[in-house]
Image (cartoon, helix red, strand yellow):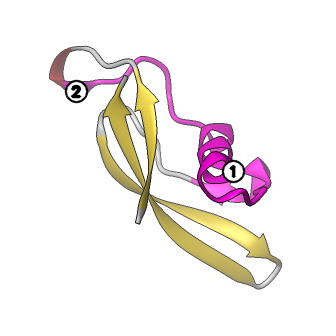
Amino acid sequence: ESFKIAKQAGEGEAIFGTVTGQDVADVIQQTTGLEVDRRGITIPDIGQLGTYEAEIKLYSDVTATVNIQVVAS
């Protein structure tokens, strides 16, 4: 399963702005009801539409990897 984040996109699937840890935390909370601390989220630099992997630190020794799908809004 992947979480979808909608961003404004321009030419060549480039997005305006960036996808932040807060964006990821918000979409996870909206989708699952789970609160995730944005500071525990590691995402690559996302500059265009597509699917990316984000790593989420759930506990000190537990991390999860989720797919983030960036789509045009």
Compute the Cα span from label 2 to label 1.
26 Å
Number of numbered discs: 2
Mark 1 = which residue? Answer: 29
Q: 10 Å neighbourhood of mark 2: few (<14), some, or many (≥20)?
A: some
Place of residue 17 in the rendered image (x, y in percent of width and height, measured from the top left): 49, 20
Q: Quadrant of residue 62?
A: bottom right
Q: Quadrant of residue 14?
A: top left
Disc 2 marks a residue whose amino acid type is Glu
Say above or below: 48 vs 45. Answer: above
Identify the magenta region.
13-42
Say above or below: 58 vs 53. Answer: below
The disc at residue 38 is none
Q: Is residue 23 left or right of residue 9?
A: right
Q: Is residue 7 left or right of residue 72?
A: right
Place of residue 15 in the rendered image (x, y in percent of width and height, measured from the top left): 36, 23
- Is 64 part of what is drawn in magenta? no
Q: 10 Å neighbourhood of mark 1: few (<14), some, or many (≥20)?
A: few
Closer to the observer: label 2 or label 1?
1
Mark 2 = which residue? Answer: 13
Indicate the quadrant containing the C terminus: top left, top right, bottom left or bottom right.
top left
Q: Please say if the residues under marks 2 and 1 sit with CB atoms less than 8 Å apart.
A: no
Q: Is residue 27 left or right of residue 17?
A: right
User: Residue at position x 78%, y 56% from top?
Assistant: 35
Place of residue 43 in the rendered image (x, y in percent of width and height, measured from the top left): 54, 52
Say above or below: 44 vs 34. Answer: above
Q: Residue reaching furthest bottom?
A: 61
User: Residue at position x 59%, y 52% from top?
Assistant: 31
Q: SS at mark 1?
A: helix
Q: Residue reaching furthest left?
A: 12
